[in-house]
Amino acid sequence: MLHKIRLLIDIIHHDIHFQPGALGWLSGHAPAIKRALNHRPWVSLWAVPKTIDSILRGISQVCFADNPLSGLLILLGLLLGDVTAGLAALACSLTAIITALIFRQPDAAISSGITNFSAVLVGTVITSLYPNVCYQPVSAPVYGYMIAGAAFSVCLLSGLAAILAPTKLPPFTLPFNIATCIVFICLRGRGLVGVPPDEAAGTPDGDAEVEWDQVFVGWAMSVGQVYALESLVCSCLTLVGLFLYSPLLVVFAMGGALVSTVTALAVSSAPYAGVYAGVWGYNGFLSAGSLAIFMVPSPRIFLLALVNAFFTTFLHAALVPSFAQNQLPVFTFPFCISSLLFLAMAGAGGMGSVRWTSRLPRTPFCAPFAGMTVTELVTDLGLRDASVDTLVLNQRFRRRILKQSDAWRGRASEVRAFCT
């Protein structure tokens, strides 16, 4: 019994892919649900549960989580924070799934919510920011443009993924950024804008003191701002959902959000309303979190994640004046640019860590099986979930881990017996 408990703790700590029993339905990437739905056809009664699973996974994939329960908690936060944004996320996600099926995108990508996570952001960001950017309430034509933007995001994702394939870098939320910019600019061209309010007289007090309690509130708010919602309830439910998926992801992402929020005090001016609202922290949240997923977490990678968040904030400040000329926010462009650069640097510089080819979560447990594809690994372990890409290991890590391969391979039978 003690041996099984120790093995269980080892599996949970090192790899969220191999969750036995009830944990397989709830935590990590919920492999039990994937196994139950993966081979079911879309043109059948299974289309309903598959669609629900894909929608919920897409909502959580915005923050790099691939778990339907995490997505359900985040969706609840969206609905409590802004019902319109929550419903827009559902509508745009469903649009993206239909578009992906029409254009025959990979079933694994649709089932994991990868094809529709950008569409989720298209829905929440347009409904939340349109009144502030275009100075009038959201109207029926705006919803039409929003649905079109959700469909465009699928095409953009497929095209960008193909372009970036030789570099083995993900497109992140670039499809959302491009589609949303197009929608807002087209809305202005169509004349769907109101009259901007009169600016208040006077200039901001550049010597105003920093309210540190509000800075920490802004740190928490930055989680909800990933979805363009200034809601503490949404932020808390999102964190609970992400913790259910991966506690390490929460540690990395919140560390990045803290670095970005504090750094924003040095690159912005008083009265720091954006800092207190979490607007300066969400890009850092995503930048640091991305390295927790696309690299094997370690103290060195955690430091790299914080540096990534630090650079992201400076990039955010540099992009604000350019986007302000078109009266647009910077969206998640700072996160995308910075994280692509840092992932490329880490991969080329021999960071001694695994770099992966897809958004799905990767952890050190699989690393000892160096040189094997995930399909071969899954077959070796007697499991059935092979809807992921090939493992990619850099040479330094490969040499180090191969020395331990024999010992780890001897445990394959233990894992197989325990998980099946």
Image (cartoon, rainbow, N blue to C red):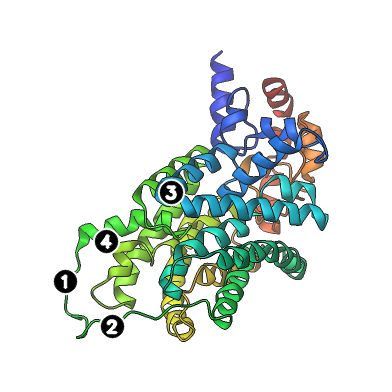
The residue that mark 2 highlights is: 199
Q: Secondary structure at mark 2?
A: loop
Amino acid type at circle 3 is Val
Q: Earlier in the sequence, mark 3 or mark 1?
A: 1
Amino acid type at circle 2 is Glu
- Locate residue 212, reporting x and y percent: 21, 61
Look at the numbered discs 3 and 4 and tell me whether their residues touch, using CB distance below 8 Å. Answer: no
Q: Earlier in the sequence, mark 4 or mark 1?
A: 1
Quadrant occupied by the C terminus: top right
Q: In the rendered view, tell whether residue 373 sits above or below residue 311.
A: above
* Disc on res. 209: 1
Relative to 300, 416 lies left or right:
right
Q: Measure how far apart labels 4 and 2 are at the Cα level.
A: 25 Å
Q: Measure how far apart labels 2 and 1 are at the Cα level.
A: 23 Å
Nearest-to-viewer mark from 2 and 1: 2
Q: Measure how far apart labels 3 and 4 are at the Cα level.
A: 18 Å
The residue that mark 4 highlights is: 215
Look at the numbered discs 4 and 1 and tell me whether their residues touch, using CB distance below 8 Å. Answer: no
